[in-house]
Amino acid sequence: MNLGHGSMIHCRVDPSTCADVTVTDQPTDAATDDKKPAAATANMKRIIDKDGNIKMVHCEDPDGPSAEKGFRKGMQSLRSMKMHWTLQEFVDMDSQFEFKIKRQEESWVGKEGVSLDTPSANDFQSYLRRFNFQRQRFGYLYGKFVDEEEEGGGEKEKKSLFGSEKEEKVKKNSKVVVEAIYEPPQEADPKAAEGFVMLEDPFEDQVENLASLLGLKRVGWIFGHPPREEGFQLSAAEVIMAAELQLEAADGVEQTPFVTVKVTVGDDGNVSFEAFQVSRQCMEMVAEQALEVGPNPGFCYVNETFTAIQEGKASKTVENNFFLTVVPIVQHVSDVFVTQFPKANRDHDDRTQSHDEMKRQLSKSGSSGWTFIDLLSDFSLLLYLCQFLDVNTDIPKICDSVVNRDVPLDDGYKIIIASLA
């Protein structure tokens, strides 16, 4: 740099890199011990002025009025983001944080809705009855999405100026067929917004792997809750959880037949099941963390960074029902699976998973029309067996025989399973 004795070096310092410090004004000596003035706290910043001198200057309280000068609450000011803005840039930026609330009229589930396996649904609600539905609980629904074809489907001929073209059949939304319910580890907690606390599940991967081997996938979730006033369908926490699960199922803000099913008991003692989906807009807002749980569970609260517009006016809350679409619900009895084995992760139940319970179930083989493979075709029982058999070799072969009864179960597996029981 050709520097020599007496050379001068000029340095430029970015003031934005200066450290913030807080100094406290101490009380004067004149103050008595009994009446010392309160220490005054001032926010100071160390800067370097144009002459190169280091100075301490006052800066605004970060939690004071200047905090409101951000583009939106919790964000930087426009100038901190960029020095020059056009009106269009500002409008485009602002629109990203604004949601004009509108109702979605139809769900993404086909006209046949969701069909619950009756024994699985009865088992779930029977457990909730043990606590008079005062305990909230949830489970994941495993089954299939069955595509519905447009009436009069098939290939159609479409005439055009360039001759006849074949038009592919149009698929409508999917019907949801639920074959099993899995209840992950959880604790009932009336103080939690959802009414329960989800715990870590050591068998999560095994559940997904077993479902895949059986040709099933997670198609929804179900929860039970105490009786509510008429018109109160889902709480804010349940709406947000439903949106999160739909986002996961769709891998983003996309159309999905993933459903939410709720079960409760009425004043007359009868149990009812209802099915819903949340709207695309709800998924968008949850993906942006724009919705929060507030004091009133019947409303979703809008994060202060965002704006919700209802009927042309800004609103700090959105009624939960605006986000819901109703899904038709029916029941069926599975042709493949049974629901007889005790469920995992339950407390205060009459039966728990054990070898004795497995023996009791499989001993029915040969009576009342039951076969060994019929009784083995139980999602909970197969998941229990995953703890004792090889999940890479044994379980896939057993599952093949479960889903395809033309594939006989090797006698060796019958002996192994019988010996476990």
Image: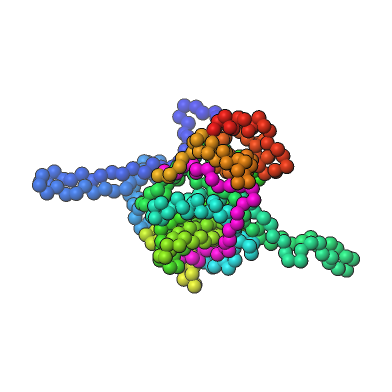
**Residue toward you, 146 or 87:** 146
Residue 101, above or below 337: below
Q: Residue at x 44, y 60 (%)?
A: 265
Region of the chain picked out in magenta, as a range: 319-347
Q: Residue at x 12, y 47 (%)?
A: 31
Residue 412 in view, yes or no: yes
**Residue toward you, 217 or 332:** 332
**Residue 342 lies in magenta, yes or no?**
yes
Task: Please state if 90 lies on the left or on the right of 131 as rendered.
Answer: right
**Residue toward you, 346 or 373:** 373
The quadrant holding residue 21 is top left
**Residue 407 lies in magenta, yes or no?**
no
Task: Work out which residue is located at the far right of the displayed protein and give it.
Answer: 163
Of the 4 image quadrants, the one containing the N terminus is: top right
Residue 194 in view, yes or no: no
Task: Please state if 12 lies on the left or on the right of 335 as rendered.
Answer: left
Q: Residue at x 38, y 49 (%)?
A: 189
